[in-house]
Image: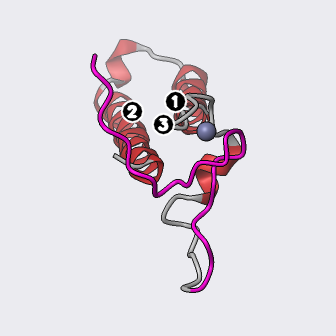
Amino acid sequence: MTTRENVRRRVWQARLLVIALLLGLIALQTFGSGLGVPQELLKSTALAGLGVAVLYLYRTPCLNCRRPLGLFAFRITGAYRQRPNEAAPHCPHCDASVDRNFPPSPR
Ligand SMILES: [Zn+2]
């Protein structure tokens, strides 16, 4: 797996987390009016979920040096279009290419 693939995998995980959280909150707001859940609690839970998702991406580790990529992780997601003649981005800590393949780590 490459670091870029790892970032994309975590982007999907974060998206699923946020979608599941929002669907749960919408269902709770729509059908759980009898439960007496305060609106402020629903809103702060949604914000906290978004914060967790962003932090999860921010802390994506480089597969070479294991240090978190930080804002660099957002740069190598699908939102960033790489030009054809541009070199692949490198880890800001160890300078390993994000397209370098690393064997899956034993767990
Ligand atoms: Zn690194």
Q: Nearer the viewer, residue 42 or 83?
A: 83
The quarter of the displayed image where residue 97 is located: bottom right
Residue 53: x %, y % from top left: 52, 35
Between disc 3 and disc 2, whose residue precedes? 2
Decide if ligand 1 comes within 8 Å of the CB at mark 2. no
Query: Is residue 103 a member of the stretch shown in magenta?
Result: yes
Q: Nearer the viewer, residue 96 or 49?
A: 96
Disc 1 residue crowd, few under 14, some 14–19, many 20+, Cα 10 Å: some
The three-letter code of the residue at mark 3 reads: Leu
Badge nearest the viewer, 1 or 3: 3
Q: Helix, strand, or loop for circle 2?
A: helix
- What's the CA distance linking mark 1 and mark 2? 7 Å
96 vs 93, left or right, is left
The quarter of the displayed image where residue 57 is located: top right
Decide if ligand 1 comes within 8 Å of the CB at mark 3. yes
Residue denoted by label 3: 63
86 vs 99, left or right, is right
